[in-house]
Image: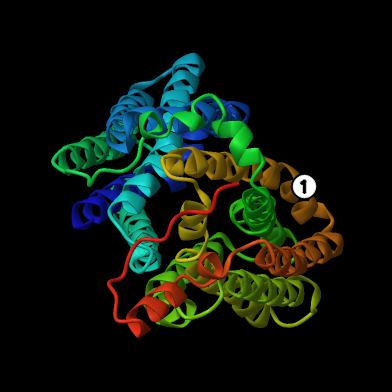
Amino acid sequence: MRRIHVGNALSAFGLGFTVPYLYVYVAQVRGLGGMTAGLVLAVFAVAALIVLPFAGRAIVRRGPLPVLLAALVTAALGALSLGLAGSATAVLLAAAALGAGQAVMQPALATMIVDCSTAETRSRAFATQFFLQNLGLGVGGLIGGHLVDTSRVSSFTLLFAIEAAMFLLLAGVLSTVRLPHAPRVEDAPRAIGGSWKQLLGNRAMVQLSVLGFVLFFACYGQFESGLSAYGVEAAGISTSALGTALAANTAMIVVAQFAVLKFVERQKRSRVIAAVGLVWALAWVVAGYAGLGHGSQEMATAAFVSTYALFGLGEAMLSPTLAPLVADLAPAGLVGQYNSAFALVKQLALAVGPAVGGPMGASLHAPYIVTFLLFSLGITGLALRLGRQLTAVQDQPWLMRKRVVARGGAVAEPVAAEA
């Protein structure tokens, strides 16, 4: 588990070097224009949507480690090619490879964490992963900002080379991991050929997927599109203040993650997600004040930064909740399939979110705030409804340990609920 976390932090560190500067690199440094830069971002989403349905089956049949190593090599080649690409075609092909590799990493890493954890330790494991991801992205972005020079293409080539090296370093670290035996599809013959049908027949998983789509659409899908456009156009936020807001989001996650974890671990998962909806509803109210409150520019800026901090608090509450719940809903041998399905839902939301929120945030300021305020309240309602589909152990996994210890037995891994 320690090696997985170290490797995950290294990959996030590498991503932090390039993600904030990708648009500037393609549009201005390479001189390919805003249209090509927009297509690059779209290619990331399309590549993820294409490969994720196959990734789940591959993880189930081959195990997460071989799939992850293949994804890391693909992403490294894509990153290095992107740093060297000079034409629009080369840039788009490199972006497709990088996007596909990054997409497959998510469910493969999540499945490895599940295989190396128990129901008792899983929430803390995923919280640690999320903490290290954000720390790595923040540190990588900070260092990358000091290395980059828009007048020198070579400085961007260096950033993409560092990103590729981090992916390969992660592959090297994880190639030494020996995972404990986990059921594969060969160990569960009844699941062969029917895993997707079985997943869609699991009402709790379907409801969680719908909830996940709304979560990612209403928050993550707005960070760098609708919400930033709203801040600039409605609240008059400067680019430096926007950077401060993003830093406040990361800082909140880093500072609050383990403090929040102590509270979350003893609560019902459905109620924690419902509380996130209320926190994000408050964030949208604060954002509304920033752009529509007619206060001073200083107050508007402070409110906008606070909005991103509140979103970070909600994210810290979700990280030890969502991924472990997906794992607990998966039948034996199909954790990789369920992780890939949930990653697919996330990618769909991240593709639709900017397309809807971007234009609204830029021009329809009040409707934008009201719309996503309602989506956040909808998260609360969907979470409470999901709670009625979960077993007691799925909603409160710590109850299992409490019951077993009270009887004087050993703590054992719960059997995942069948559809």
Q: Residue 30: in sight, yes or no?
A: no
Residue 75 percent across, percent down from the top left = 35, 30
Q: Residue at x 68, y 57 (%)?
A: 218
Viewer-nearest residue: 147 or 416: 416
Circle 1 — which element? helix
The relative height of residue 38 versus residue 372 in the rendered view (above or below) is above
Of all residues shown, which one is farthest toward the left? 176
The relative height of residue 403 versus residue 100 in the rendered view (above or below) is below
On the rendered image, what quadrant is the N terminus found in? bottom left
In the image, taking residue 381 as reference, residue 66 lies left or right, namely: left
Q: Residue at x 62, y 75 (%)?
A: 271
Q: Residue at x 31, y 49 (%)?
A: 115
Q: Residue at x 43, y 44 (%)?
A: 332
Residue 314 percent across, percent down from the top left = 56, 71
- How many numbered discs sit on the rendered protein? 1
Q: Mark 1 sits on what residue?
A: 359
In the image, taking residue 43 as reference, residue 266 lies left or right, namely: left
Q: What amino acid is at disc 1? A: Pro
Residue 31 percent across, percent down from the top left = 50, 26
- Residue 355, picture quadrant: top right
Q: Residue 301: in sight, yes or no?
A: yes
In the image, taking residue 304 as reference, residue 60 lies left or right, namely: left
Viewer-nearest residue: 364 or 170: 170
Viewer-nearest residue: 37 or 178: 178
Q: How is the image coloured?
A: rainbow
In the image, taking residue 280 as reference, residue 256 lies left or right, namely: left
Label 1 neighbour load within 10 Å: few <14, some 14-19, many 20+: some
- Residue 308, picture quadrant: bottom right
Residue 91 percent across, percent down from the top left = 46, 22
The relative height of residue 159 versus residue 262 in the rendered view (above or below) is above
